[in-house]
Amino acid sequence: MSAGQKKKGTVTQRNTVAASLVSGVIAAAEVLGGGRADMTLCLNVSGINQALLKSPTSRVDGEHFVALLVAIEAAMKDEAIGVRIGAVLAVSSFNALGYAAASCNTLFEALRLIPKYEVLVMTQGNTEIVEMGEVVDVRWSMRNGQYLAILEDLFLAVWVVLGKRLTGRDTLNLEVAFTHKCPGRLNAWKEVFGS
């Protein structure tokens, strides 16, 4: 093997999340009323080293990110916190994928980027875009089969808010279905997704 060549073989992909997404989630939770002290506690409980968040190219262990989301949900005491965070999360939280999607001419162009580049943001995310005539079905799950309602809510809210920005419309012709049970109060979901 000569210099610069890599050994071919199976590449094992660790479960990681872009530090920019973690920082974005923390910032969004603070905008929504989570105190800085509460968010620092959530970071500590989740085992995330805050020094990692200073570099947007750093990666955070995926299990620590899940622990952070669970801690934020407990601290905020709001079953709709995933939807609320997704609705205010900055495009910059998604690194190059966020900027590329926001630069697209159509929502469909933006959606088609996600499956190809989502590993830049979250290695365990699995987005499927299924075209059925004039209907486009967008599905999100975790590659490892793990399920977390707050994460599902967050990503779907991000897509819908991005779609509204790209189309310049306050409402979109869409149908949203979740894999979690229906929440007690739907106000936050209706604000983001429509009635």
Image: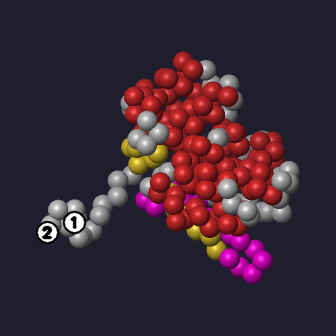
On screen, 60 above or below 37?
Answer: below
Residue 37 sits in quarter: top right
Task: Answer above or below: position of 3 versus 156.
Answer: below
- Whole-angstrom CA distance, mark 2 to mark 1, is 6 Å
Q: Nearer the viewer, residue 83 or 53?
A: 53
Which stretch did the figure color magenta?
131-147
Residue 45 colored magenta?
no
CB of mark 2 within 8 Å of CB of mark 1? yes
Q: Is residue 131 left or right of residue 66?
A: right
Which residue appears at 57% of the width and 20% of the height? 36
Provide the residue designation for mark 1.
Answer: 5
Residue where numbered disc 2 is placed: 1
Q: Residue at x 68, y 25 (%)?
A: 33
Q: Secondary structure at mark 2?
A: loop
Q: Where is residue 70? Give x, y as percent.
A: 52, 37
Visible residue check, residue 142: no
Looking at the rendered structure, the kind of residue marked 1 is Gln
From the viewer's perspective, is 21 left or right of 33? left
